[in-house]
Image (spheres, grey):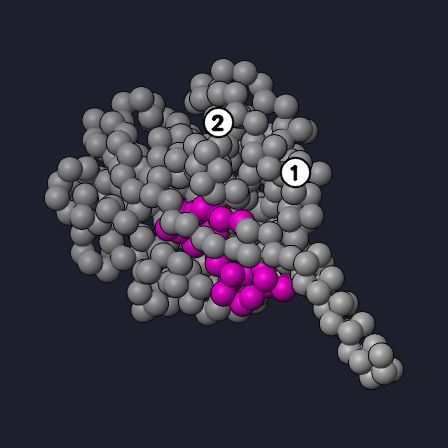
Amino acid sequence: MTTIWKTALGAALMLTALSSAGWAQTAVNVGCTATTDCASAAVALEEGIFKKNGLDVTMTLIGLNSNIPAALLSDSIQIGGPTPSVFLQAVDGGLDLVAVAGASSTAKATFDTAGVVAAPSANIKSPEDFVGKKVGAPGIGAFLQVLFSKWLIDSGVDPKQVNFVEVTFPTMNDTLKSGAVDAVVTAEPMMSRIIASGTGEVAGYFLEKLPERRPAIFYASTREWADANPEAVQAFRTSIEEAAKIVNDNPEKGRQAIANFTKIPLDVLSKMKLSVSDPKIEQEQLDWWVATMNEQSMLQGEPDTATLIQK
């Protein structure tokens, strides 16, 4: 065998080894609802960041945030974007889930990216006006419904006097327009769409007085999957950190990625702020959520938050 052929054979064997080992792509299906909170995952997919880090990622649109824990448990998705309240209630109910990365969090500059939007005919002008009204929320016990309830409590209104029903983000405009509900607890990009259509008007921004960096969404998996795939978890975190910087520095790329994922028209997204992408998730943040949920008697036990973030 000539030197040239030996060199060629060696190179071929090296490429084979790389493609079967170091370049192997781990398949991960990421499930999120139709909000801007998972913009970092959408951008990481759109910009090829996941692929660069060895992940073969697909994204699945989930109708209700409260469905995400069940989707994780069934392995129809490997990573999901639950709200902290949905995550903590699932853990409280016995599901072994862990947070693997941050997705979005509250910030003073983006308090108006979520709110409660009421039909003009409902004549809702203050928190007291919600008593006896029917309010649609994208999951009972999800981020928006819990913080809207906290806003009511802080305003002296018992949320038990409000009739909550689950309404998916894509159907909120039609549900409000039909009169099936008096108001919807919603977020961008759906909020701008409802207001632009004339179906509803903002009756309150319940995120306005929240502390900074309270997670709205974070990425989670089952502990079993995370323990079995430590390299994939690290690659996912690395990808989300890179993508979060793009979302925060270049919102247009974030909007385009969200449009491609949710199928919401780009002209609607172009008129709104994006949620702040925050790739870190910390115990103190979960502790705040536990305290907020305990205020509403939403937890039976006391979750050990120190064990709920994958190392």
Residue placed at 78% from the left, 78% from the top?
Answer: 8
Drawn side of residue 20 relative to residue 161, left or right: right
SS of the residue at dot 1? helix
Q: Is residue 152 visible?
A: no
Quadrant in which residue 273 is drawn = bottom left
Q: Earlier in the sequence, mark 2 or mark 1?
A: 2
Q: Left or right: where does residue 87 sit relative to residue 123?
A: right
- Residue 254 lies, with reference to residue 292, above or below; the image says below
Secondary structure of residue under mark 2: helix
The span picked out in magenta is 28-53
**Relative side of 102 to 264, left or right:** right
Q: Which mark is residue 90?
A: 2
Residue drawn 48% across and 68% down? Answer: 253
Camera-side residue of 293 and 11? 11
Give residue 243's position: percent from left, percent from top: 58, 61
Whether the magenta-drawn stretch holds residue 34 is answered as yes
Q: Is residue 174 above or below residue 12?
A: above
Residue 9 occupies quadrant: bottom right
Q: For residue 215: magenta? A: no
Q: Label 1 sits on what residue type? A: Ala
For residue 228, which numbered disc appears in the image? Answer: 1
17, above or below 118, in the image: below
